[in-house]
Image: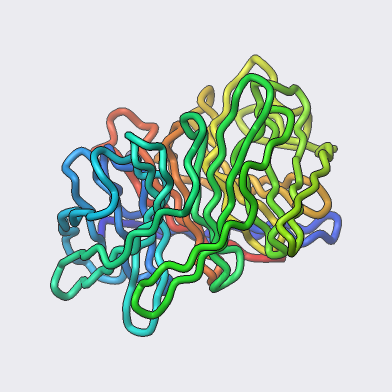
Amino acid sequence: MNGYTQEGQLHSNHNGLATVSQRKYSTFDGVRFSPDFCVSPDGSTCYFLDQSSFKFIVVDLTANLSPYPCNIPPFEKIKGSKIWHSLHCVQRKERTYILALLEEVQTNKIFLATIQADIYAEKLTVVYERYLGQRAMFQLSGADIQEPRIGHIFCIVYWQDAKKTYCHMFKIKIGTRGNIYPNAYGTNIAVDGCWFQPVITKKSTVVFLSHPSYSIDCWLLKLKINQFFRWKHTIEKVPAAPSREGGAVIPGGWLDNTYSLSFSRPRLEDDYAVYYVYDFDNYKGHIWAIDTNRNLIKTVPVDFDGHDVQGRDAQVQKLANDTLYVHGFCSRPSCEEAAHLHRIYLLPI
Ligand SMILES: [Zn+2]
């Protein structure tokens, strides 16, 4: 482990709303060319997907051990080339499984696979592959595995054309042997407009962000799906959205053409959608948290000591113990490590 820990400061709570705040964070070496990763639910092990060498890089986050590579095991049902869209870790009894959301390129079929991780044998095994019963109609704009409450696992895939955003959503159960039991929770959902980076709330509502390229204001699209899998949606404005001033992100106007931000996929913290947002002009990373009930944005300043991870490839994962992980390439060109995994402790206040 090549890391450091820094005590941060708690936020004052001006208006009585619960929010999230950085308390302290640790940094580990990341893996170059492989932004996607997942962390075991106990926080002990990180699995980086290194597609350049067709391996997972396994890192023990609790001890000063060298990372080791594990070959990506062969798949039986998924044929030909595949796109890895999202990773997520679950524990079933003593076993750790990596869930991988994959797209078979030839057919655009969406698959979920469970890969058993045996860190003692330094071995990964594919134990289950399941076609989720749906194809993507076009190239996917995004796909994610989220677990808003422990045991409530969802896969969401979405794509866009010039006028609409479409999505499929699946509720997933994972058995003790890694078996996958998928249920189509909503399929072929189509809404007007360009929406991205959805978060699934504890009430299973899907909340999309308006795409900055298409709207000066920040809007949320909230998709509610009932027990009969019928859906309805509302579009709600975010009244106080961030802008940049003096290098810091503060409440103001939404995005304009004068600067560019990239958003990671969100993770849920209480009722907040939490994003890692990178400001390309200032080489600064921030944590943004949108209250999905009140539509308010909070920003959580994090000082990464100049080693902010950058760009559209930065990824986040979150554990149930309010720990957020951000992984990506370092914004400092001379950085020896080139990539970092930042572990941030979030506090509800
Ligand atoms: Zn760095």
**Image x and y of residue 22, in percent:** 58, 57
State the residue at coordinates (30%, 41%): 82
Q: Is residue 322 above or below residue 73?
A: below
Q: Is residue 260 above or below residue 328?
A: above
Ligand 1 found in image quarter: top left
Picture coordinates of residue 154 (x, y %)?
55, 59
Name the colouring of the figure: rainbow
**Looking at the rendering, in which quadrant would you find the N terminus?**
bottom left
Give the image quarter of residue 196. Answer: top right
Task: Look at the image and tell me in which quarter the C terminus lies.
Answer: bottom right
Q: Foreground residue, 345 or 313?
A: 313
Name the side, left or right, on which 310 lies relative to 78.
Answer: right
Residue shown at the point (70%, 30%) measured from the top left: 243
The reply to whether residue 338 is visible in this rendering is yes
Q: Nearer the viewer, residue 221 or 59?
A: 221
In the image, what residue occupies the spot 16% across and 66% down?
Answer: 123
Residue ID at (60%, 29%): 247
Q: Quadrant of residue 218?
A: top right
